[in-house]
Image (tube, helix red, strand yellow):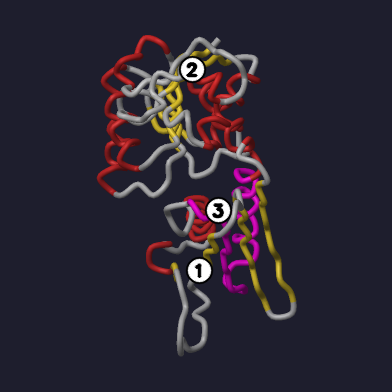
Amino acid sequence: MIRIGITGAAGRMGRTLVEAVDEHPGATLGAAFERPGSSLVGVDIGELCGRGPAGICLQGSISDALDAFDVLIDFSSPEATAAAAELAARAGKALVIGTTGLDAAQQAAVERASATVPVCQAANFSTGVNLSLVLLETAARVLGDTVDIEILEAHHRHKRDAPSGTALAMGDVVAQALGRDLGSVAVYGREGQTGPRDRQTIGFATVRGGDIVGDHTVMFAADGERLEISHKASSRMAFARGAVRAAVWLAGRAPGRYGMREVLGL
């Protein structure tokens, strides 16, 4: 059994991860963490999730329970993720990262950790999304420069980064298949007299509202026809199950940075 530690375990995603660990036959919950100073520190995570006593109380510091887990799953904030990566590297703990919106310095901390411990990092841990990335790569190569490409994404009102990490990952897969640099061709908003569309660009449109878990559509628009590849998530459990699957797969791997393609054998 692989012992899992979960950061931000009291949050929406954290509680879903607790449930996903509980249902996985090869995993068990070893430790649960919440931000230091939280009023929930010391609360039994099972009671908090409405699943009955688990015998594991929320802790405010990862370093206080390093012996309790084999793999740490982190869906937190960019700042917290960078700190967790440095701690995991020092402690020799494998790390699964689902946090998006990391800046260059924070991503560098992840890269340094991956030189010492195995790290699985993905913008999205859903099996469906990762299959979509393969389909997008194929579509982009077949359609080439004959289409205009637009990426539409929608999330709940609480999401902090835009476009989503998944939308950016989709754009990057398409750009690479077409031999383009996403940083040079991405258009993140249009307003006013923008003039004719440049076919080399890849457009992004962002919606935030309500409790939308996550919708993504990549549109390949040509003259006379349009291909759309979409993924719509109705529950965070799709992401949580993928993250736990990645954690079990990651345990015992050599140091390095892995993605869901490796986990899923794609």
At a point 43% along the width and 31% down the height, the residue shown is: 8
- The amino acid on which the numbered mark 2 sits, given as a three-letter code, is Asp
Q: Is residue 147 magenta?
A: yes
Going from N to C along the chain, the mark reached first, 1 or 2, is 2
| Disc 2 and disc 3 in contact, CB within 8 angstroms | no
Going from N to C along the chain, the mark reached first, 2 or 3, is 2
Q: Label 1, on which residue?
A: 202
What secondary structure is found at the residue carrying circle 3? loop
Q: Is residue 86 magenta?
A: no
Residue 17 percent across, percent down from the top left: 55, 29
Residue 151 percent across, percent down from the top left: 56, 64
Residue 132 percent across, percent down from the top left: 64, 49
At a point 58% along the width and 21% down the height, the residue shown is: 21
Going from N to C along the chain, the mark reached first, 1 or 3, is 3
Tag in front: 2 or 3: 2
Q: Quadrant of residue 217?
A: bottom right
Q: Does the magenta stretch mainly form a helix, a strand or a loop?
A: helix
Residue situated furthest right in the rendering: 224
Q: Quadrant of residue 92?
A: top left
166 left or right of 127 in image: left
Q: Residues within 10 Å of mark 2 (few under 14, many from 20)?
A: some
Part of the protein shown in magenta: 129-158
User: Across the whole image, how many numbered discs are drawn on residues?
Assistant: 3
Q: Nearer the viewer, residue 74 or 129?
A: 74
Q: CA distance from mark 1 to mark 2?
A: 47 Å
**What is the quadrant of the N terminus in the image?**
top right
